[in-house]
Image (tube, grey):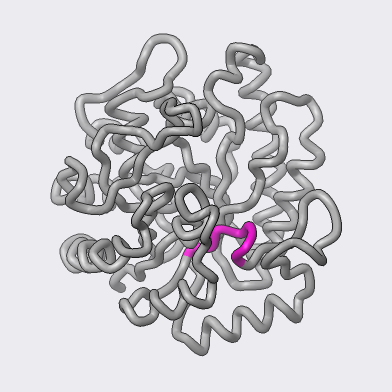
Amino acid sequence: MSKRISIGSWAYTIGPYASHPVPFDTVCDRLKELGFDGVELGAFPPHPNPGNPNGPDSEWPGAMPEKSQRAELKAKLAAKGLGLSGIAANLWGEKLINTDDQTKYISEFKKNAEFAADLGIPGVRVDSVQPPTILRDVDYATALQRVVSTWKTCAEIAADHGLNVSWEFEPGFAFNKPTDILRVHDGVNKPNFGLMYDTCHGQMVGVQGIRQEGEKEVFPTQIEFLKMLDGRINHIHVIDSDNTCHKDANGDDETSAHPPFGLGLLDFDVVMPALVQAARLPHDWWTIDLCFWPDAWVATESCKKRVDELVARYGA
């Protein structure tokens, strides 16, 4: 079966779009026009989300705390012929590494898992929340134990809802070295817990070693990195890389830049066969990620055409 194509809705709500987010209905209508099969939901305002993590939902844009609201959204998307490939859970306001009490994080994860299950979404995306510099304040063993223990619990919650968990490793968050990635994945050791491989993050983490603390761990190309991750990947994001990062408000490197196809340097005729070989996807989705790209709305059409070509070559 050929792969279905989605795109992350967060590209139209955060970063350059934070002051003028594109409404979710507008996003879905445009994706349908362009021939997308679905959308990957950034489950935070103003797009549909499970509710306010810090208080009442009444003034929280996009909040859908009721099952009836979620059923209506699911039906509306089905009527458009669009599926939901996954969600990015709104966990960035929680503490994971810099506390010995992850109760609030786990509670919010559970809320997102229930939301995903109600919408028929196959999996939930997580990251390690704190930047790599947190390891200057929290010793490595303690940080690793906190992440592994918490994600074990989250994976069990997800399994109870029939969901997978995908950890998106990237330069901007702790445990961004190849050996870190193996330690965390091995430590969680749950069948429904895997790695999200973003081709841009793969370049920046595995080849460039951007924002790695201490001595860098890098490979000559993504191919060697993918061989190391063989069998561990359960979700895929595809986008180009120009070996640079998106900059934060101070002009410092934050995380991978996610330029549209053709504005970077990746050879997808080399990367995609290796990625397909290394991945063990529990679904048939490939997702485009234009996170932080300033013209994501305009670039969506050309990215869809490029991924159509990749699916035709490597997505059977």
- Left or right, 172 with respect to 202, comes to right
Q: Residue furthest bottom?
A: 79
The quarter of the image holding the N terminus is bottom left
To which quarter of the image does residue 66 belong?
A: bottom right
Q: Position of residue 142 (x, y in %)?
A: 68, 18
**Residue at point 26%, 62% (across, down):** 303
Q: Position of residue 37 (x, y in %)?
A: 39, 75
Q: Residue furthest front?
A: 19
- Left or right, 124 with respect to 307, comes to right
- Left or right, 281 with respect to 152, comes to left
**Residue at point 35%, 49% (across, down):** 279
Q: Is residue 246 magenta?
A: no
Pick the residue in front: 172 or 101.
Answer: 172
Pick the residue in front: 230 or 29.
Answer: 29
Up the image or down, 104 lies above or below 69; here it is: above
**Residue at point 69%, 64% (across, down):** 61
Up the image or down, 33 lies above or below 216; here it is: below
Q: Position of residue 248 (x, y in %)?
A: 47, 33
**Residue at point 57%, 85% (across, down):** 76
Magenta stretch: helix, strand or loop mostly: loop
To which quarter of the image does residue 96 belong?
A: top right
Q: Is residue 46 magenta?
A: yes
Q: Report whether residue 316 is seen.
A: no
Pick the residue in front: 263 or 125.
Answer: 263
Q: Position of residue 238 (x, y in %)?
A: 32, 53
- Left or right, 251 with respect to 316, comes to right
The quarter of the image holding the C terminus is bottom left
Span of residues in magenta: 40-47
To which quarter of the image does residue 190 belong?
A: top right
